[in-house]
Image (cartoon, grey):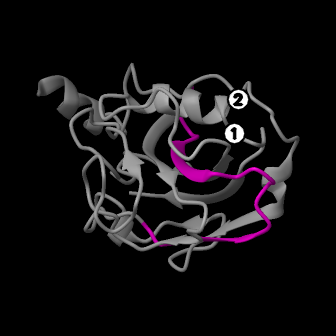
Amino acid sequence: WLGAALAIAAGCGGGGGASPDAPTGDAGGDAGADLVLTSAAFTTGTAIPGAHTCKGANTSPPLAWTGTPPAGTKAYAIVMTDTSLTPALVHWVLYDIPPTTTSLPAGVDHGYAPVAVAAHQTDSYDGTTIGYLGPCPPATHTYEFALYAVLASALPGATMDTARNDAVNLITAHALSRRPATLTGTFTP
């Protein structure tokens, strides 16, 4: 308990939450550039609204994507990362999103298989919550939401016990592009 509290107080981070290495899979070039990720809550480079941070309800923001998915897309995955930390800290991983899905509502519920979205989630940066936990650092940080087109409808090797960094490694290994569609936002306490 104390370790989790210290990690949160230190700015949403600590060991074990660092992001994995850069993607190694590249089944389809840079096809992720054909997708555009947006949010009705904020635009790229602007502040993530308080409702989507620890200062508010701490719910996931609404996300939507447009464009042509890479050929062979069988699912999508969303990875939210605090890029201000070195190494970067993975906050949220949602994967196995059906290929017909083009948006996520605000407030995706917690749990391995959220009710509002036919997908799966990993633990968050606190190590106990399954699903989204938003920004909460003591200084200004930048966050990246990345949308991956994945070549498997069910992420191979992933289970309800898969940790977020392991899930990111599996996502990038099965991604159809090394370069996901991204949306960035900031948080200032």
Residue 130 is situated, as x and y percent measured from the top left of the image, at 27, 44
Furthest-right residue in this view: 29
In the picture provided, is 57 more to the left or to the right than 172? left
Task: Check disc 2 and give the amino acid type.
Answer: Pro
Q: Please, what secondary structure does the residue beneath circle 2 have?
A: loop
Kindly tell me whether residue 158 is visible in this rendering. Answer: yes
Where does residue 150 sit, x and y in percent of width and height? 65, 45
Q: Is residue 2 left or right of residue 145?
A: left
Residue 54 at x, y percent in the picture:
29, 57
Q: How many marks?
A: 2
Packing grade of label 2 (10 A; few <14, some 14-19, many >=20) is some
Amino acid type, mark 1: Ala
> Badge 1: how crowded within 10 Å, few (<14), some, or many (20+)?
many
CA–CA distance between discs 2 and 1?
Answer: 8 Å
Using the image as rendered, state which of residue 4 and residue 74 is in the foreground. 74
| 41 vs 115: above or below | below
**Magenta span contains residue 93:** no
Q: Which residues are magenta?
A: 61-86
Q: Quadrant of the C terminus?
A: bottom left
Give the quarter of the image for residue 46: bottom right
**Residue at 18 percent of width and 33 percent of height:** 5
Q: Is residue 88 visible?
A: no
Q: Is residue 64 magenta?
A: yes
Q: Residue 106's spot in the image, x, y percent?
A: 39, 72
Question: Which element type, helix, strand or loop, lies under badge 1?
Answer: loop
| Viewer-proximal residue among 2 and 17 | 17
Name the mark on residue 175: 1
What's the mark number on residue 74?
none
Circle 2 residue = 23
Residue at 78% in and 44% down: 179
Query: In the image, 120: left or right of 151?
Result: left
Contact, mark 2 vs mark 1 (Cβ under 8 Å):
yes
